[in-house]
Amino acid sequence: MLTGSFVSSLQGEPRATHDIDVVVAMNETAVRTLVDAFPPPEFYLTEDPFDQSRFSRKSVEEILGISLRVPSPEDTVLAKLKWTKESGGSGASLARWMH
């Protein structure tokens, strides 16, 4: 499932981004392979209960002829609020996105 600024641009106000965030469901054996292939700190991997719950609410959107799995718009806003809080940022960036 695609997440982050890429999806918030699809569901809200477009903005520039330099990455694409994804949430994946995988078994524990595959996790080690993924971590080895994409080591920190260049890549960020987490087991977040919120990600697990929003994964269950994903939907399929057709974008430029490609079917993409994306979170609900509500989950996108909640994720942005969570990220703003965790990064120590203000709500100003989220307020700009929502207008």
Image: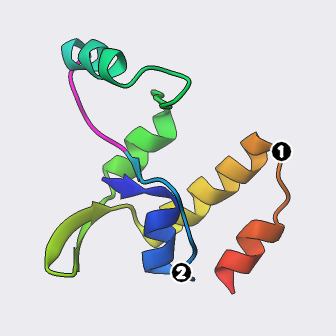
The amino acid marked with disc number 2 is Pro
The chosen color scheme is: rainbow
The amino acid marked with disc number 1 is Gly
Check disc 2 and report its element: helix, strand or loop: loop
The x and y percentages for residue 43 are 48, 31
The residue shown at (59%, 65%) is 77
Badge 1: few (under 14), some or many (20 or more) residues near its Cα, within 10 Å? few
Magenta highlight on residue 24: yes
Tag shown at residue 14: 2
The residue shown at (20%, 12%) is 29
The x and y percentages for residue 38 are 37, 25
Q: Is residue 27 left or right of residue 75?
A: left
Give the magenta part as a residue range: 23-27
Tag shown at residue 49: none
The x and y percentages for residue 18 are 52, 57
Magenta highlight on residue 61: no
The alpha-carbon separation of the residues under discs 1 and 2 comes to 23 Å
Q: Nearer the viewer, mark 1 or mark 2?
A: 2
The x and y percentages for residue 61 are 24, 74
User: Can you identify the residue that label 1 sits on?
Assistant: 88
- Magenta span: predominant SS is loop
Q: Is residue 31 above or below residue 91?
A: above
Q: Give residue 25's quadrant in the image.
A: top left
The residue shown at (53%, 81%) is 12
Q: Is residue 28 left or right of residue 18?
A: left
